[in-house]
Image (cartoon, rainbow, N blue to C red):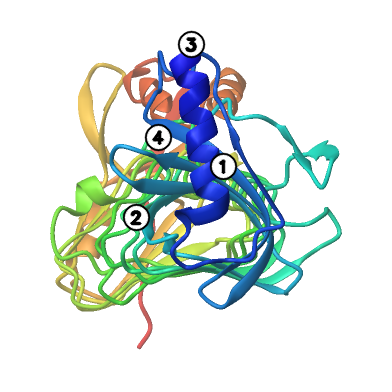
């Protein structure tokens, strides 16, 4: 233990007097030693500084986790009096690889001698940043990265590999008030639940975006429009279930041209009450529309699919009804397509769900993710009733 205390003292001295090659102005600095330091995480130190200059920007406060072995940094908190917050790619010559708080890393902290509820990127709850820029070189936003943050928009770099950690706990922008997110990386993955309950209204993806979008990624956000990525391959593995679940302000989804396959996953648009229809370009080769809880008596998704091309192939789900026959089912109310088109031919053979029994509707409302697939196996016509698909010819 004596060696650990000595080590902390030496590192603190070096940090304050000689460590930073950029020679920032430091009013105060301290190293916070984690529990069992030297036993569980000897290669990590948490550093706090006040009144510091980095790459020409002045900050009132910074808190970061430094890996002393790999010499890389994760910024946990950064505050400025300016209305633009630039998160740097280097501190004292060492690369910043990650941004954000990990699970269990304190809900409060000391700043200028005062204990306050932790808000990592703002001086106080009243401050609303105009812009946040995550610098090029940073590779990941972890766990609760920008939870509760208030800003007009945030710009994410090409170098960013992941927003979140591809798990149910990746709530990077949960409850944030950031209305516009700009993603520059063509391979930046968006983990599940990242924008849950957020104030996100718009997300801008690059034209060549090929990243994955996890389950329930935008659930219950304020998203208003979305441009579907132009995936080159692997369409069924790119977008997961329930992506736009309960996005009550979502009213328009635009699909790219010249797509071999557009795959709409399970419960993708569940609860999107303003999204009345989906329109697919004439150049689309195939559209797969997975299960969405929708019936004449339970309108919890887009009611109409519009196909502009004659050659667009359509696939729904296979539904074994009353143990007699497996029907092709599209869980929408109507299909509109050109005369003599593949989509119209599919509609003439397909079924729609006319109604769900009250019990089924209650269960679907409770479980709107992949669990709803059990309805596909409900053979009893007393609970689910099928009818002929409604369709009409697209007017020129």
Q: Are marks 3 and 1 in contact (CB under 8 Å)?
A: no
Circle 1 packing at 10 Å, graded few (<14), some (14-19), many (20+), is some
From the image, tell me which residue sits under label 1: 47
From the image, tell me which residue sits under label 4: 386
Residue 253 percent coordinates (x, y): 46, 67
Residue 360 percent coordinates (x, y): 53, 22
Instruction: Tell me the CA gap for discs 4 and 3.
Output: 72 Å
Residue 186 is at least partly visible in this image: yes
Q: Are marks 4 and 2 in contact (CB under 8 Å)?
A: no
Q: Earlier in the sequence, mark 1 or mark 2?
A: 1
Residue 108, image quadrant: top right
Q: Earlier in the sequence, mark 2 or mark 3?
A: 3
Circle 2 packing at 10 Å, graded few (<14), some (14-19), many (20+), is many
Q: Earlier in the sequence, mark 4 or mark 3?
A: 3
Residue 136, image quadrant: bottom left
Q: Nearer the viewer, mark 4 or mark 3?
A: 3
Tell me what residue is drawn at x 35 percent, y 59 percent.
160
Instruction: Tell me the CA gap for discs 2 and 3.
Output: 35 Å
Q: Earlier in the sequence, mark 3 or mark 1?
A: 3
Residue 61 percent coordinates (x, y): 69, 55
Taking depth in this image into account, of 68 and 325 the one nearest to the observer is 68
Taking depth in this image into account, of 87 and 143 the one nearest to the observer is 87
Residue 202 percent coordinates (x, y): 56, 68
Q: Nearer the viewer, mark 3 or mark 1?
A: 3
From the image, tell me which residue sits under label 3: 1
């Amino acid at each position: 233990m004596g060696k650990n205390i000595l080590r902390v003292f030496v590192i603190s001295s070096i940090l304050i007097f000689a460590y930073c090659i950029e020679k920032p102005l430091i009013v105060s600095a301290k190293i916070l030693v984690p529990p069992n330091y030297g036993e569980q995480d000897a290669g990590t130190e948490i550093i706090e500084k006040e009144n510091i200059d980095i790459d020409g920007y002045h900050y009132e406060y910074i808190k970061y986790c430094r890996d002393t072995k790999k010499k890389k940094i994760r910024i946990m908190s950064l505050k400025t009096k300016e209305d633009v917050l630039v998160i740097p790619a280097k501190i004292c010559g060492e690369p910043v690889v990650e941004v954000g708080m990990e699970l269990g890393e304190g809900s409060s902290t000391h700043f200028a001698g005062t204990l306050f509820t932790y808000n990592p990127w703002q001086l106080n709850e009243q401050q609303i940043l105009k812009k946040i820029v995550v610098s090029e070189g940073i590779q990941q936003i972890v766990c609760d990265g920008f939870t509760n943050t208030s800003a007009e928009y945030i710009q994410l770099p090409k170098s960013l590999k992941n927003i979140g950690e591809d798990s149910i706990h990746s709530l990077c922008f949960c409850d944030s008030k950031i209305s516009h997110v700009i993603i520059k990386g063509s391979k930046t993955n968006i983990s599940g639940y990242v924008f849950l309950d957020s104030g996100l209204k718009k997300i801008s993806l690059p034209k060549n975006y090929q990243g994955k979008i996890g389950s329930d990624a935008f659930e219950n956000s304020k998203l208003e429009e979305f441009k579907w990525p132009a995936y080159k391959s692997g369409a069924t593995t790119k977008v997961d279930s329930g992506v736009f679940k309960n996005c009550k302000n979502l009213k328009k989804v635009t699909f790219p041209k010249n797509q071999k396959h557009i795959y709409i996953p399970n419960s993708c648009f569940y609860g999107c009450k303003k999204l009345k229809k989906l329109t697919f370009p004439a150049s689309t080769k195939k559209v797969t529309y997975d299960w969405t809880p929708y019936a004449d008596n339970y309108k919890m998704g887009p009611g109409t699919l519009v196909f502009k091309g004659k050659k667009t192939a359509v696939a729904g789900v296979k539904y074994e009804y009353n143990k007699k026959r497996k029907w092709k089912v599209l869980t929408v109310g109507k299909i509109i397509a050109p005369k003599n088109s593949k989509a119209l031919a599919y509609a003439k053979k397909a079924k729609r769900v006319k109604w769900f029994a009250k019990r089924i509707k209650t269960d679907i409302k409770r479980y709107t993710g992949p669990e709803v697939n059990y309805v596909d196996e409900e053979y009893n016509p007393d609970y689910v009733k099928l009818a002929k698909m409604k369709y009409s010819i697209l007017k020129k």
